[in-house]
Amino acid sequence: MKALYKSAFFLILLLLPLATVAQKQKSKAQLQKEKNENLKRIKEANRILQQTKVQKEASIGQLNVIQEKIAVQKGVISTISREIQLLNSGVKETEGIVGELQADLESLKAEYATMVYAASKTANSYNKLMFVFAADSFNKLVMRLRYLQQYSEARKKQVELINKVQAALTGQLRMLESQRQEKKSLLDKQVVENKNLLSLRSQQDNMIQKLSKQEETLKKEVAQRQQAIKKLDNLIADIVREEIARAARAAREEGRATSGSSSKITLTPEAALISSSFAGNKGRLAWPVERGFISQKFGRHSHPVLKGVVIENRGIDIQTGQGESARAIFEGKVLTVASVPGMNNIVMVQHGEYFAVYAKLRTVNVTEGQTVKPKDVIGTVYTDANGTTELQFQIWKNNNNLNPESWIKSK
């Protein structure tokens, strides 16, 4: 019975970690995926940085790339830290299994020694015969024969169980050694990545110092940008107002009920379907460029160099590589193709009561009234005199400005 209990315990001991091992493998795969994505982002940032360096020694575009690399580098270090935590958990669990197996093995060996000692008392055939024929009835004789047979089989099973536990212990010890080596490798890598982060912070400080010497130029650029944004805002407001009025007239002519509001578009059934679908895909919409990073977020922000200067962004700026295409984020109709000083060419695509605005385009590939599908090319992104290639991207609902970052997929 004792041997049977030990066998069951051994099986439970080996089966218990399987669920946690599967979970750890899944977590490890997720961390590896994060790591690969971060490495891809760093590679892309390096490519963009090299392109901006060709034109100018120091620029806001270069500073944006360095800040993006710092953010990604922090992500790399965070991923390594979580890998180490996961590994620490695995090492602790493996050490527990090793301890249990070692204790189980010692117990099995002790039981086997007791069995061998007991068997030695009836080691020869004479003693066995005496034990069997000393029975005072035929039934007891049969029972003693069965006992001897079962005792012999129990000894064999005990040996098999000892061998299995020994093999499992050997495997767990190998795993423990492998985990410890992997932990050491990750700790070494963490040290290297922390040094890389310090180097990036030093680059950031040097870049800010260089840009601080260009204060007048930067102030002029900020003023020009704010003027360009104001012109773009006015253009968007005019276009939306005209579209609201046009849709209301069309609804009245067709005998459809209007919203009764001068700030909301009256939608046809088809447009209402597109609008609903657009809203339903919030957070999952395609990126307006294939590659790049958000160099300036939505809303009011302090200038990265100029103290006391606040920049207001009506959308998001996405910095990308030279020659990169701007792409439609969703199915819609090209409402406007225009040009705004400081924002270059712009394209406005309507998605029911939602509007996507693509500004700072060098060339335009679509025409007004054209229907576009997700990822259709809108145009190519403009590269400025500093070598910075940046798309200004906005999303509106009627005449309300929205944060595009919460609508497109997260990277």
Image (tube, rainbow, N blue to C red):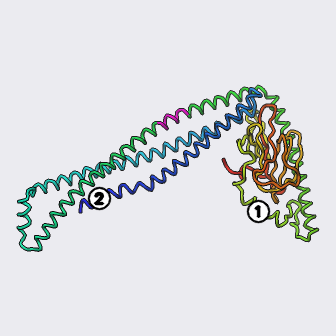
Circle 1: residue type: Ser
State which region is magenta: 185-192
Q: Please provide percent x and percent y for residue 89.
A: 44, 47
* Position in image of residue 54 (x %, y %): 75, 28
Name the quadrant of the N terminus: bottom left
SS at badge 2: helix
Within the image, what quadrant is residue 126 found in? bottom left
Q: Is residue 99 left or right of residue 139?
A: right
Residue 272 locus on image (x, y percent): 81, 64
Say which residue label 1 marks.
276
Could you say whether the residue bearing mark 1 is in a helix, strand or loop? helix
218 displayed left or right of 182: right
Circle 2 residue:
7
Q: Residue at x 70, y 28 (%)?
A: 207
Closer to the camera in the image, 329 or 76? 329
Q: What amino acid is at disc 2?
A: Ser
Asked if residue 109 is positioned above or below residue 84 in the image, the reply reads: below
